[in-house]
Image (spheres, grey):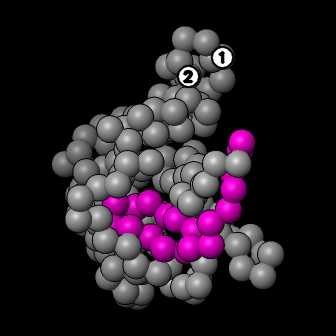
Amino acid sequence: MTTYPGEIWLPVIGYEEFYEISDYGRVRRLKRRKGPRGVNWPYLQPVPQRSGHLTVTLYRDNKPKLVKVHLLVLEAFIGSRPKGMITRHLNGDPADNRLTNIVYGTYKENLEDDIRNGILKGRAPWKVTAPCKSQECKRGAIAKGFCNKHYLREWKARTTS
C-alpha cells in the first residue's frame, strides 16, 4: 500500500498496543500478521456500510468490535466527541476519512453541509439502490454505485494512486 508524504500515525484510543490510525483514515496493526500467500499484511481493510461510512473490526482479548473509521480518526487526532455534537464529512463523502475532511459539529451544521454538497436534493449517491456499476456484477449498489466487492476495488485504486 502507498505511503503518503507527511502521513501522521497515532495510537487508536482504547487499542494503543494493537492499532494505529493515520490522518488519512488508514488503520494498521502494530503486531504484523501474515495475510494470504504469506504476505505481510499490516493494514486493515475497511468495509463500506449502507450509509457509505467505512468500518473496521478491531480485536482485543479475542473480542471483535466494529468501529467507524471516521470516529477513530477524530478520537485520536482531536479528542473525544463533545456532548451534543456529531461527526461531519465536509465534502459530503462518508468514505473520505481524511482528517482535513472530518470535524465535530452540530446536526444543523451537518444539514447545511448536505445542502451545500447537493445531497438533500435527492437521495445521496452512495445510498442509491441501483445495480452495481461493474459490468460483471448483478448485485445491488450500496456505496458510490458499487457493491461491497467492487467498491473495495475502486477504493484501493483511489487510495494507492
Q: Is residue 79 above or below residue 156?
A: below
Q: Nearer the viewer, residue 144 or 35?
A: 35
Q: Gap between marks 1 and 2, in whole Å?
A: 6 Å
- Secondary structure state at the residue bearing disc 2: loop
Which residue is situated farthest in the top direction here?
135
- Residue drawn 61% across the image and 33% down it: 149
The percent position of residue 57, horizontal first and vertical second, equals: 65, 63
In this orientation, does residue 55 appear? no
Name the residue carrying label 2: 132
The percent position of residue 147, horizontal first and vertical second, equals: 59, 31
Residue type at tag 2: Cys
Which residue is situated farthest in the front direction here?
38
Left or right, residue 10 beside residue 151:
left
Q: Nearer the viewer, residue 16 or 112?
A: 16
Q: In the rendering, which numbered label is found on residue 138?
A: 1
Highlighted magenta segment, given as a residue range: 19-37
Q: Is residue 84 above or below residue 114?
A: below
Q: Is residue 121 above or below residue 139?
A: below
Could you say which quadrant of the image residue 155 lies in? Answer: top left
Q: Nearer the viewer, residue 132 or 82?
A: 132
